[in-house]
Structure formats: structure tokens, C-alpha cells
């Protein structure tokens, strides 16, 4: 579990910037400002270290009374996206504190970015698992994109777990690890992350300092 410092953001899109003489593809993430709505401590009733962050302004009439009370307790306006992040030491944070991209990260840092990948619906084995498919000549009849055998007869008498078969593709939580932070625009709260990050444009992402040393 990644307990390194992090922030919630929204994927803006991809572009390219110049790094010396090289053109670098980057993904722009609008990271923060995020408000600390709640602090959870291992020594308290929660039993673990975490902070709850709120991101983007929400209209007041679109939240219910319990949510309104939660935001009022934190002395902040309603937020569209609320998410909890595990941290190593929650005592460093206070309710109502505002986290910005420039405060959390510096250019050159290595990041893990988590988001929900684009959903591609129900797909067959050739698209989902890169199966080769069957030969398309010499009498082959209506058997071109099938998955083939999925098991044996009496022994073991069932389909083995983990068998690659057709099913939903995408729409799953994915983490891109060890991405380099090429640039930070502190005034606009933008992170320029080298390479691609999971999800579609305007999708929410969690940006954290990398868990594995590069």
C-alpha cells in the first residue's frame, strides 16, 4: 500500500513540451487545490492513518444534508470528488488545510498515477488477450476468432481459474508507476507528467510519490 504523499487531480489531456532539443510527450493533470476534510489516526477510533480530501467545487443543492454537515464541519464549501488517501503520518495534516500541486511535488520527481481505464465493453479473446485466431483457409468454417479449448473432460472436470476468455475490457483501476514529473505549474495547479496516465479526459486520478524506487 502506497502511503507516500499524494494529491487528487483531474486528467486534462496530452500535449508535448521541449526538454532541451528533445520533444517530450506529457499528460497534463489538474492537481488540487484539495481541502483536507477529515484526518484519521491509528491511535483514534479509526485505527489507521489516512486523510480525506475534497476536490473541485460542487453546487450546494446537489448534496444531501449529511454531506452538507460534513463539509460544514471542515469549514469548507461542498466538493465534487471526495477521496481518502492512506498516509504514513496523518498528524502532519489538519482539517481545512489546502494542498496544492506545487507544495506536494517538485519537477523531476517520480510518481505513481492511479485512475480508471477507458471502458471498451465486452470484447473477444483476440482483442482482449491478443489471441492469434484460427487459420482462414483449407476448409475452415465459421471458426476464425474463437478462443479454442477451455479445459479437459473428466479430469479436472471444470474450467481452470484464470483462463483467458471473452469479457469486459477496461473500466478497471490501473496504476502507471515510475512516471517522471517533467514540469510543475504551481500557479495553475498543473502537473506535466511524462508519458500516458490511465483514464479518459476529465477522469479523476490519484497522484502519489512512487512506491518503488527507480
Image (cartoon, rainbow, N blue to C red):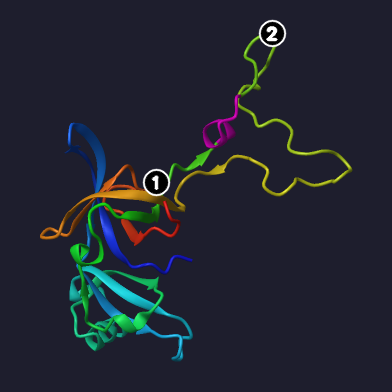
In depth, the one of 156 and 59 nearer the eye is: 156
Q: How far from the left and from the top, in percent, is residue 207? A: 33, 59
Q: Nearer the viewer, mark 1 or mark 2?
A: 1
For the residues bearing labels 1 and 2, Cβ distance under 8 angstroms: no
Residue furthest top in the image: 138
Q: Quadrant of residue 71?
A: bottom left
> Which residue matches tag 1?
118
| Residue 138: mark | 2
Q: In this image, 112 relative to 29: left or right?
A: right
Q: In this image, 137 relative to 114: left or right?
A: right
Residue 84 highlighted magenta (yes or no): no
Neighbour tally class for label 2: few under 14, some 14-19, many 20 plus, Cα within 10 Å: few
In depth, the one of 168 and 49 nearer the eye is: 49
User: Which residue is painted at 71% across and 49% down in the image?
Assistant: 161
Tally the marks. Answer: 2
User: Which residue is painted at 17% across and 36% down in the image?
Assistant: 20
Q: How far from the left and from the top, in percent, is residue 2? A: 44, 65
User: Which residue is painted at 37% across and 72% down in the image?
Assistant: 84
User: Which residue is painted at 42% across and 80% down in the image?
Assistant: 49
Q: In this image, 77 relative to 199: left or right?
A: left
Secondary element under disc 2, as helix, strand or loop, is loop
What residue range appears in magenta? Answer: 124-132
Secondary element under disc 1, as helix, strand or loop, is loop
In depth, the one of 165 and 206 nearer the eye is: 206
> CA gap, disc 1 to disc 2?
39 Å
From this view, report whether residue 94 is shown above or below residue 205: below
| Residue 100: mark | none
Neighbour tally class for label 1: few under 14, some 14-19, many 20 plus, Cα within 10 Å: some
Q: How far from the left and from the top, in percent, is residue 86? A: 41, 72
Amino acid at each position: 500500500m502506497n502511503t507516500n504523499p499524494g494529491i487528487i487531480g483531474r486528467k486534462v489531456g496530452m500535449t508535448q513540451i521541449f526538454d532541451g532539443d528533445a520533444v517530450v510527450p506529457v499528460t497534463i493533470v489538474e492537481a488540487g487545490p484539495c481541502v483536507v476534510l477529515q484526518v484519521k489516526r491509528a491511535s483514534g477510533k479509526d485505527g489507521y492513518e489516512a486523510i480525506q480530501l475534497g476536490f473541485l467545487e460542487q453546487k450546494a443543492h446537489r448534496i444531501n444534508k449529511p454531506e452538507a454537515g460534513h463539509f460544514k464541519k471542515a469549514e469548507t464549501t461542498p466538493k465534487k470528488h471526495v477521496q481518502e488517501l492512506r498516509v504514513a503520518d496523518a498528524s502532519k495534516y489538519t482539517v481545512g488545510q489546502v494542498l496544492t500541486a506545487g507544495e506536494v511535488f517538485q519537477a523531476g520527481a517520480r510518481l505513481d498515477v492511479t485512475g480508471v481505464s477507458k471502458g471498451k465493453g465486452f470484447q473477444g479473446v483476440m482483442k482482449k488477450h491478443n489471441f492469434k485466431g484460427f487459420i482462414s483457409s483449407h476448409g475452415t468454417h465459421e471458426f476464425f476468432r474463437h478462443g479454442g479449448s477451455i479445459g479437459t473432460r473428466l479430469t479436472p472436470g471444470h474450467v481452470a481459474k484464470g483462463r483467458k476468455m471473452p469479457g469486459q475490457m477496461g473500466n478497471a483501476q490501473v496504476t502507471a508507476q515510475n512516471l517522471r514529473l517533467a514540469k510543475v505549474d504551481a500557479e495553475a495547479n498543473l502537473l506535466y507528467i511524462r508519458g500516458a496516465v490511465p483514464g479518459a479526459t476529465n477522469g479523476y486520478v490519484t497522484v502519489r510519490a512512487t512506491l518503488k524506487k527507480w
